[in-house]
Amino acid sequence: MKTLLRNCRLIPALSGGWDSGLADVLIDGEKIAAVSPASASAPGSDGLDCGGKTLMPGLFDLHMHINWAYHNGELRLDDFKIFIESCLSARLYLDNGITTIRDLGSARRVSAAVRSAIEAGLFAGPRILCGGLILSPVSRPAEPDPYNFLRYVSGCDSMIRAVREEIGSGADFVKLYTPLLPEEMHAAVRAAALYGKPIAVHAHDLVSIRLCIEAGVRSIEHGSYIDAESIEKLKTGKSYLVPTLSVLSHEVATPSYTPEMKKRLLAPLLEANAKNIAAAYRAGLRLGFGTDSPIEELDRTPGLEFRMRHEYCGMDPLDLLIQATVYSAEIAGLTGLTGEVREGLCADLILVDGRPDEDISVMYRRPELVWARGVLHRPGQR
Ligand SMILES: [Zn+2]
C-alpha cells in the first residue's frame, strides 16, 4: 500500500541533509520509497497534506523494560498476565512516537514473545530488540526467583553458558549487571561476539564504567559517575553511553520506591547525572536515548527524557532529537534501516505540530501521527 505525505517539514540532520524546503514523502509498504520537493507532486494528488508540520524519524527508547511488575515486589508469575500487560505496554510506546525499543531485561523473556506477536501482525507495536534475562552476579546465598528476570552467574564458565543460552533463546543482545570481575565481563563480550551480538551493561559507578570500556561492551547504561578520562576514551572506543534521566525524576512513581527512598537514593544520582552526563555531552559523545521507566508513567508525562536532559544537562533541542533517532539507531546497530527520514529506510515516522529542533517542548506532547514500518497509528486511539 502506498501513502503520500505531502508538504512535510523535514529536519536536515535527521533527513540525510535534506535542504530543499517542504517535502513530499512516499511510503510504499514498510519503506520510505521517495522523498521529493513538495512542488514535484501532482497538484490535487491523493495523500495526506501535512501542512508544513514536522515529519521526523520515529523515536528510540534504548533502555526500557517491557514488563515492570518485577519491581514492586509482587512477582507476577502468571505468564498470560505478563504477556498481555507487555503487549499493551508495547502499544503505548507507539502512542508516544517511540517506534524502536530495546528491552533491557524482562520477566520470563517476555519481550521475545511480544516481538513475535508484533512481527506476526497481531497488533501494531514498535520494533523490539530483546535482552532476554539479565545476567547478574550471585550476590546472596539464597537466590530469589531466578526464573523471573534475573539469571545468576558466577565465574567465566557460568557466564559463557548464560550468554549462549540467552542468545539461543532469542536475545538480540545480552544485558549484564555489575559488579563483575574483569575476566567475567571479557568472557561475556567474547562469547556474545561469536554470534555477532553486543553487550549492554548496567553501570553507575566508575570502576564498572572503566571495565566496560576496557572490555569493549556496546553500551554503558546510566553511566552516572563517568569521569573525564573515561569520556575521553569513549570518543575513540567501541562503547557508547546510554543515560537514563527519566528514572531519576520525582514525577515517575517508581514502584516499590516511596518518595522518601526516592529522595535519598535518586537525588544524588540526578546530581551526578546533571554534572557528568552534561560533561559527556559537551565533550561531543554520541549519547543514546533511554528512560529506564515504565511506559505507563512516561505516558502520563510525555517527553520526560527530553525535558530532563534539557533542564539538567543543558542539551540543545536539535542534539536531543539526534540522540533519540540517529545516534540511538547507531548504538542499536540499525543505521541504514531506521532512524532517519530517507529514501530506502523503514517508514518509522512521526508527525509533530511545531519545530522541535528549535523548541524541545514540542516533544512534551504526543505526536499527532505515527507510522511504524509503514503502518499508520493514531495516538490515543487504543
Ligand atoms: Zn533498567
Image: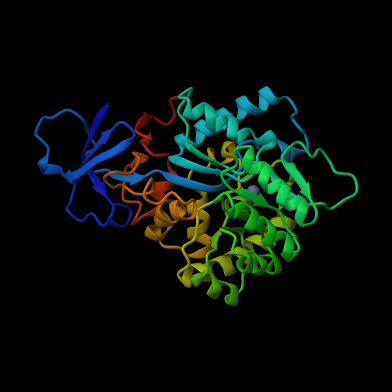
Q: Is residue 249 left or right of residue 42?
A: right
Q: Is residue 328 above or below residue 238?
A: above
Residue at the bottom extreme of this rendering: 229
Left or right: 267 in relation to 129 = right
368 sits to left or right of 169:
left
Residue pictured at 26% horizontal, 49% vertical: 10
Query: Percent from the top left, x then y, of residue 136?
Result: 75, 50
What is the x, y in percent for residue 36? 17, 45
Q: Is residue 49 left or right of residue 112?
A: left
Residue in view at x 17 percent, y 51 percent: 21
Specify how the rendered protein is coloured. Answer: rainbow
Residue 234 against residue 105 in the figure, above or below: below
Q: Residue furthest right?
A: 141
Residue shown at 43%/49% (left/top)?
Answer: 334
Where does residue 41 sit, x and y in percent of width and height? 12, 38
Quarter of the figure with residue 209 = bottom right
| In-front residue for pair 158/319 | 158
Of the 4 image quadrants, the one containing the N terminus is: top left
Q: Residue 77, position in %: x, y?
A: 75, 28
Q: Is residue 350 above or below residue 175?
A: above
Picture mark count:
0
- The answer to whether residue 5 is visible is yes
Out of 121 and 359, give the one closest to the viewer: 121
Vertically, is 243 above or below 280?
above
Q: Can see residue 225?
A: no
